[in-house]
Amino acid sequence: MSSFEKKTMKSKELYERACRVLPSGVSYGIRALPPYPFFVEEAQGVKLKDVDGNEYTDFWVGHGALILGHSPKRVIDAVRKQLPNGTHIGFSHELEIELAERIVRNVPSAEMVRYTTSGTEANMYGTRLARAYAGRMKMLKIEGGWHGGYDSLHKAVSYPFTKSESAGLNPKTTEDTDAVPFNDLDIARKRIRSREYACIILEPVMCAAGFIAPESGYLQGLREVCDETGTLLVFDEVVTGFRLAPGGAQELYGVKPDLTILGKIIGGGFPIGAFCGPTEIMERIDQKKYPKSEDRVAHGGTFTGNPISMVAGCTTLDLLKDGKTYITIDKLGRRMRDGLEDLFGRGRLPATVTGVGSTFAIHFQSKIPRNSADTARNDAAATKAYFTHMLDRGIIYLSPNVSHCWLSSPHTTEDIETYLTATEEFVRGYKP
């Protein structure tokens, strides 16, 4: 019996119970940790306590959504105040205006906003809007780009990029979607000029591949070729929005897309998604200006503009407004990346580090990856062994197959040093 199993017997019992009612015993496949997931009982700041009383330092922080950590007091207080006034209204209310005003104030491309309840939905509605506005059906995406489970974008997600990404996925839904590598401007230019695309959609920083940054001129080049060809540039900033800067990656890199997809942080820890852009594009949703269904882009959802998500999002964005959180977590991010690079530089285990701001990722290979295909060369055995090593030391992130992490405001210098010490132990002791 492993050390993990010895200290997580209650979690094992819950897992066996979960397997009877949840496929694979989980509500999301990436949470199916080997040999079974631990079950969290309490989450505060960046500390998790499981049902067996074990404590973990969380570097996953709600899939990156919890920039203020778990259960921040100001957000919880605001939610408590809202609860007696309505948890789900189903009619218009002021809070949905207030969050939209904050988004418009911060995100360079945003003049108008519409909400969804997930990033997947936001990508679905956002790209539908792009196709309607451009009057074209074909879309271009990036190999390895993750835009949620929406059928038309569920293509070329995992290597090799030619295989189907899911059983039951109708190939007709993806036949008008093409894919090109990240950070290769020449290939993107040629492809965009060769076909009439409604849009190219990409994460300006490739997050699922390990926070791979755009090379100098890449995003600017995409902006130029999109302008040249009448193709809309769509940034999926579900991860990077309000994470890298108040205005997201588009503020950080100085490139304004035509449409922006948001999620995670804008919900303050509650379910949300949004898509936003200039009035000229967004008004294609307006039933007053476009009364005919064939001219208007349909959008809706029972929980859109949910007041709990709205008040939590407003409070979170207000707490980020003075910029102090970004200074703190970006400094910790630099410390972590510098420390990891130093460790791997002195060790015998080939590994490189990527990341921007408060994000970091480790790739067990000697070459720094430029795109998702490059990350396929990571040493899978070392990656999994590293995850197990860190978990045994009370450090958690997802997944065992990709070593990528977020930092949030409750993280401390001590948390960074503990992470680095555990990594140094791994580098010294790992034997392929």
Image: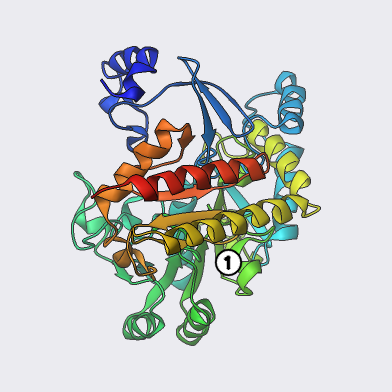
Q: Nearer the viewer, residue 160 or 97?
A: 160
- How many labels were placed on the picture? 1
Q: Quadrant of residue 194?
A: bottom left
Q: Nearer the viewer, residue 420 or 28?
A: 420
Q: Nearer the viewer, residue 167 or 91?
A: 167
Residue placed at 43% from the left, 59% from the top?
344
Q: Is residue 233 placed above or below 29 in the rendered structure?
A: below
Amino acid type at circle 1 is Ile
Q: Secondary structure at mark 1?
A: helix
**Image-based side of 338 in relation to 181, left or right:** right
Mark 1 neighbour density, 10 Å: few (under 14) some (14–19) many (20 or more): some
Q: Nearer the viewer, residue 334 or 303?
A: 334
Q: Visible in this render: residue 164? A: yes
Residue 261 x/y as whole percent: 54, 56
Residue 300 x/y as whole percent: 52, 43
**Image-based side of 295 in relation to 66, left or right:** left
Residue 106 x/y as whole percent: 72, 59
Residue placed at 66% from the left, 67% from the top?
251
Quadrant assignment for the N terminus: top left
Q: Quadrant of residue 145?
A: bottom left
**Image-based side of 318 in relation to 166, left or right:** right
Q: Visible in this render: residue 293? A: no
- To which residue does mark 1 refer? 281
Residue 72 x/y as whole percent: 70, 32
Q: Is residue 212 placed above or below 267 in the rendered structure?
A: below
